[in-house]
Amino acid sequence: MKHIGWSLVLVVFAASLCSAQTVLYFPQFVDGSPGSGFWGSAIAISNPAAAGTAAAVGNITVTKFDGTPLNITFSDDTMAPTSNTFQLGGGQTKIFFSPTLSFNLQPFVNGFATVTSSLPVTAGLVFLEGNSSFSVISQAGVPGVTPLKTQATVALRNTIENTGVAVAYPGTGTANVTYQLLDKSGNLIVPAVTKALAANNQTAFFISDLFPTAPAQFAGTLRVNSDQPIVTTALLITAQGLLSTIPIFPVQ
């Protein structure tokens, strides 16, 4: 596990090229063992301004899927405990590892993470999946995102692959979210599904579970339409547990 540190940094930076904002969200954050193996999340935050400029001051908060705070102790890239805060001058970076990635195996938890900063920063998160021997099986990086009302991602399902999606609502009240599964010609494959998402709640699902009557194999687009701004991320997951990132893009 210790040898993944700097290779992980490179993966994170590859996933960190998102537009600089003062608040960025990661719609899925996981850590711990769901019964066999483990999951972990690593977040890198960087101040893209020129060296010598004012420091960006901020923090990471993690919220459980049910809207309650998830208070965890992060580790840095030396595996030493670190706070959830950062103070980054221009060009500086700080990396946060979830507890399980510093050999502190926890019960499985999931939710979403929020990066808040006094100045624009870039940020990326890497998911790591491992086996019971604590060896990494797969990893995938995603960028921090900002809330949108209408967005989409590639949807794919076949005998060895399935699309997983996570959605979080960091606002107040309730977001009513409609999911549309379209084929490559833009036609509905099955009827749309609408689900409510309460304030600060998060949900994650396979597309095959959201649309149980969809064909066993399809390729197309998942459109996500909400009456309130929400954040979304997606991964393609194989039957062997291998992960790859699927971009989320805004649509009209």
Image (cartoon, helix red, strand yellow):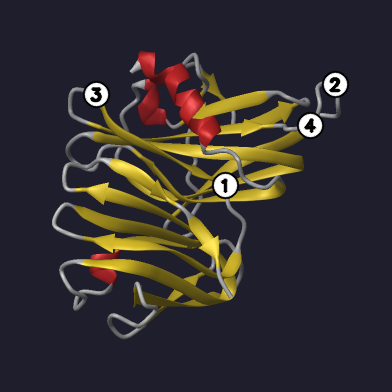
Rendered position, 174 above or below 131: below
Residue lying furthest bottom: 191
Q: Which mark is residue 157?
A: none
Q: Secondary structure at mark 1?
A: loop
Q: Amino acid at mark 2?
A: Gly
Q: Residue at x 52, y 34 (%)?
A: 14
Q: Position of residue 12 (x, y in %)?
A: 50, 32
Q: Could you classify mark 1 by the number of other residues whose Cα lies within 10 Å: few (under 14), some (14-19), or many (20 or more)?
A: many
Q: Amino acid at mark 3?
A: Phe
Query: What is the C-alpha distance between the residues marked 3 and 4?
Result: 37 Å
Q: What residue would you read off at disc 2?
A: 52
Q: What residue would you read off at disc 3?
A: 134
Q: Earlier in the sequence, mark 3 or mark 2?
A: 2
The answer to the question of whether label 3 and label 4 lie on touching residues, with beta carbons closer than 8 A, is no
Q: Could you classify mark 4 by the number of other residues whose Cα lies within 10 Å: few (under 14), some (14-19), or many (20 or more)?
A: some
Q: What residue would you read off at disc 1?
A: 144
Q: Residue at x 70, y 39 (%)?
A: 121
Q: Earlier in the sequence, mark 3 or mark 1?
A: 3
